[in-house]
Image (tube, rainbow, N blue to C red):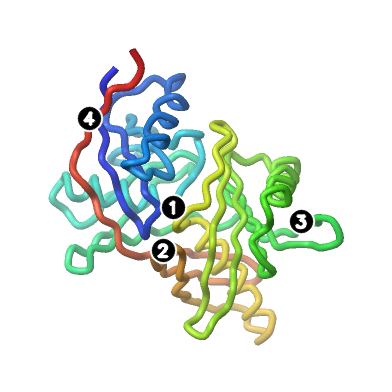
Amino acid sequence: MEIHFVIADPAGNITAIVKDGVADDDYRSVAAAIMQDPQWKVEQVGFITAPKVGGEARLQMMGGEFCGNAARSFGKYIAKKMRRQEAVIEISGNSAPMRIETDPARGSAKAQMPCPLKIDELSVGLGSYPVVVFEGIVHLITEKKMPEPDDLKKMLSLLYQKYDAEAAGVMYLEKNAEGYRMTPAVHVRATDSLVYENSCGSGSVAAASYLAQQQCEQTAAEQKTCTYDIQQPGGCITASVTFSHGKVTAAFIDGTVSIGGEIAMEIGS
């Protein structure tokens, strides 16, 4: 079959948005075919479907997971198609519509993100790590180093054992002279795909939530809005969170997103 898709680049986290009506059962094979083609360098795939909860359009990710960068990309794609500077979209792994605001002059897209359900802790061996839990994805934060492949698999397995999530990430967060740098690794359960991503939107919110919690604890502040420019292998994502009385009450991510032209690809016989 022939499929048609556009490629979005949100801070290097290359995302394919498939325009055709692909059957759910074919998501895995279509996503694999796109991601395995080296010319596109795609890290994740979403499929346009009919909206369910009041959005203008819906993007179903390849494993039913939530993805902040895909949401920004899809929002910019829909806004551009409608000749507007904002769009209200739906995405898998999130039960409410999301508002995406675009700035053509900056080439950016800003998303109001779902807030974490909680900031938890996971014991791994002799250590423990903060885990930021969202509706459709969980992220473990490590400030030590990016785990070796075997240790990474162990962490992901423990995350899935403890949390009912469609996807899980390990975010290596380090402080440097310029601020913060993060290296994301994200696994999608349904497709069993592990990608060392060039950037991660929900991971950026996870890191910002963790850092804001620390700041509030250190300053004994009941409420604080914190903004962080988080450098990642593919570019920078600005994450802003409001931490109030022990939880995140508002979260946003912002950064550049480019949308390419339509691509046709033959899949299967």
Q: Amino acid at mark 1?
A: Gly
For the N terminus, the quadrant is top left
- Kind of element beneath mark 4: strand
* Of pointers 1 and 4, the one earlier in the residue sequence: 1
Q: Residue at x 24, y 50 (%)?
A: 259
**Do the numbered discs 4 and 3 sit on residues whose CB atoms are within 8 Å?**
no
Q: Residue at x 16, y 53 (%)?
A: 84
- Kind of element beneath mark 2: strand
- Kind of element beneath mark 3: strand
Q: Amino acid at mark 2?
A: Ile
Residue under numbered circle 2: 253
Q: Is residue 9 left or right of residue 64?
A: left
Where residue 266 sits: x, y (%)?
A: 28, 23
> Separation of disc 3 and disc 2 at Cα?
25 Å
* Of pointers 4 and 2, the one earlier in the residue sequence: 2
Q: Amino acid at mark 3?
A: Leu
Residue under numbered circle 1: 68
Q: Nearer the viewer, residue 170 or 65?
A: 170
> Separation of disc 4 and disc 3 at Cα?
44 Å
Residue under numbered circle 4: 264
- Kind of element beneath mark 1: helix
> Separation of disc 3 and disc 1 at Cα?
23 Å
For the C terminus, the quadrant is top left
Where residue 3 sits: x, y (%)?
A: 27, 25
Residue under numbered circle 3: 122
Q: Amino acid at mark 4?
A: Ala
Where residue 109 sits: x, y (%)?
A: 30, 60
Mark 2, Cα crowd under 10 Å, few <14 / some 14-19 / many 20+, is: many
| Mark whose residue sits in front, 4 or 3 | 4
